[in-house]
Amino acid sequence: MLQVKNLHASINGKEILKGINLTVKPGEVHAIMGPNGSGKSTLSSVLVGNPAFEVTEGEVTFNGKNLLELSAEDRSREGLFLSFQYPVEIPGVSMVNFMRAAVNAHRKYKGLEPVSATDFLKMMREKRAIVELDNKLASRSVNEGFSGGEKKRNEIFQMAMLEPKLAILDETDSGLDIDALRVVAQGVNRLKTPENAAIVITHYQRLLDYIKPDIVHVLYKGKIVKTAGPELALELEEKGYDWIKKEMGDA
Amino acid sequence: MQDSNQILNEVTKEDYKYGFVTHIDTDVIHRGLDEETIRIISAKKQEPQWLLDFRLRAFRYWQTLEMPQWAHLQIPPIDYQDIIYYAAPKRKEGPKSLDEVDPELLKTFDKLGIPLEEQKHLSGMAVDAVMDSVSVKTTFKENLAEKGIIFCSFSEAVQHHPDLVQKYLGSVVSYRDNFFAALNSAVFSDGSFIYIPKGVRCPMELSTYFRINAANTGQFERTLIVADDESYVSYLEGCTAPMRDENQLHAAIVEIIAHEHAEVKYSTVQNWYPGDKEGKGGIYNFVTKRGLCKGEGSKISWTQVETGSAITWKYPSCILAGDNSVGEFYSVAVTNNYQQADTGTKMIHLGKNTRSTIVSKGISAGHSQNSYRGLVKVSPKAEGARNHSQCDSLLLSSTCGAHTFPYADIQNETAVVEHEATTSKISEEQLFYCQQRGISVEEAVGLIVNGYAREVMNKLPMEFAVEAQKLLSISLEGSVG
């Protein structure tokens, strides 16, 4: 589904990603862990086409297409979704209008007619239930005045609405209490199918208790330095990242 | 030659979709402005002597005036002798009924989305269609007349209801009010006249569609709305013009009189040709609009969505003379490319317990300049006056300007006057968030801008809210890059 080869990227001339290699297949859940500043969020931003970052080398294919050639909106329409670490507030734009624009943009890309108002509202209702998102939030402006937990639930709600092939969850656990974490993780699990895949970016093992990864990668200084099964996450939880740094000869 | 230019323009600037020209024989008078011009206009309209005298007084006064320079606008010098002051589509000869309209004109208005055949009418809306200097047709006149409502072109009102016209013309905006008011009073051509009798609630939206078609002409619209005691009317005006490289002048006067407990809702969707991306051409929209809340408990509400015109100079205002009267001003003004707008309102509190609300949303893009200018005045006798003003600016580029000039003149210490202002910019993060959900940048700007303007858009009549939303998005196309 996703092949990343020797990906280099920089921001303001500073290189952050220094040769990432990653392959994600349908049905897989990958966890990307690593200390602060290792490039985890940069990787997710680059994959979804954030214009703040510049790709200097490497290639990325997504379902056979050259992802780097696609605009950010087309990457979304192709089925790539990012649950933002810091979801943006858009005052004045109601969640309903926002989601309808998004859903219809996806449909148009597939050559489908816009969704009818009744079908859309029904869809909103069903998907909201997955993350226990309050009806009131759905009628408010996008993320405006949402608590940290509500914002994250809202991200997963949008994921449910758009049914992506590959979802990237960027530190979705940050700022969540244990109950919110459980709701968000359950939501993600319910959306899991053998056809889609997820990349879970996190600093801590905690989230991985709820969302079980198949493969765990450690990102350090812009490179994936370790790849193993779920046991790697437990090892990191126990020993921290210092031993990785030591292995890399940095500490 | 001009035609091929026109076609090129249309192909390259698809975003202004009303820029076409109707090819129709037009009756035009000579260029330039002198007493003779005014006598010709008056004669063409077969006006009574008192109206010609009114025009001539205004003209003589205008000759003593200089163009105002106080607005935050760069207005190139206007040669008033190079303008044609009267242009009318020619009526075809033949045994036709007076109501019959040239099919070419019907087509034009159809193309603009304003069907003039009553069976095709927009639900619940009567239309007065004005092309250049004359009204082409007014729909539903008879149905409205059954309720005693007069809705007709201004010229017709002069013929059939001279007493009403004479009583109210210039009673809110005197010809001595300002430079453009004097000019309009001298040369005004057509517009709409509305009279709603006592206790009548007008059963449909009344609207006027103004179209400039002829080249090198100015349009000098004159609209007069009188709402008698306890009556209600909602009125809407729309306007478009062909794309031309020369600037054209539109200098209108709108007067509204609301008697006791009457309510008038006046909405504008202004989409005059704004000029091209380099700022060439476009309409100069220099307009004086004012409502007088004359009676106790009367209410006048202005709602405007301003997207067109190269330069806009416009301050729809309310004089709150009656006790407990209410004035409202809701405005969205969009400027893109090299457009300039200096717009706002005046709320003049004279009566006791008068209330006014001002909500202004400016949206600036490209190299445009967008100013809000507003005055809240509370006279010594206006006990218990209240005003709330909110002026927001949204910037879409770093090369545009947004300015706010609020003035307050409070002469009664019981007044409560509040003013809030904000300035914001659409952030890269917001746009990217939308893109990540599959929404293109252009569409995202449309969503955000419409969200920002929603409070004002909600005040528009239903039929036009959707149209106006589209217009907002279209006029900002290509503004973010």
Image (cartoon, rainbow, N blue to C red):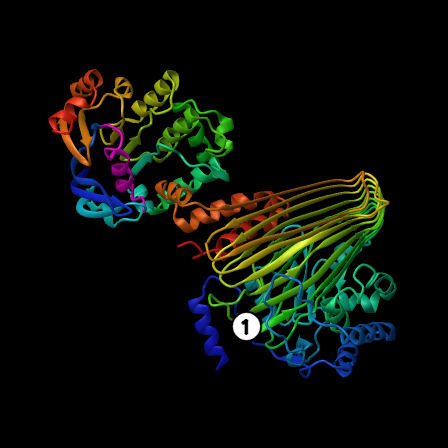
Rendered residue at 63%/75% (across/down) = B78
B272 to B149, vertically: above or below = below
Q: Is residue B247 left or right of residue B159?
A: left
Residue A64 seen from this side: no
Q: Position of residue A206 (x, y in %)?
A: 28, 18
Quarter containing the C terminus of chain B: bottom left
Nearer to the camera, B175 or A175: A175
Residue B79, horizontal then vertical, whole percent: 64, 78
Determine whether, in the image, residue B296 is placed left or right of residue A16: right
| Marked residue chain, label 1 | B
- Viewed as shown, does residue B317 lie left or right of A80? right
Image point 38% across, 24% down: which residue?
Answer: A175
- Secondary element under disc 1, as helix, strand or loop, is loop
Is residue B177 visible in the rendered structure shown here? yes
Task: Identify the amino acid type marked 1.
Answer: Val
Whether residue A117 sits left or right of residue A199 in the image: it is right
Crowd band around label 1 with a 10 angstrom C-alpha radius: few (<14), some (14–19), many (20+) = some
Coordinates of residue A109 in the picture (x, y in percent): 33, 46
Which region of the structure is painted magenta? A34-51
| x, y percent for residue A165 | 27, 35
Q: How many marks?
A: 1
Q: Is residue A207 magenta?
A: no
The residue at the point 57 percent across, 56 percent down is B370
Which residue in the structure is indicated by mark 1? B21
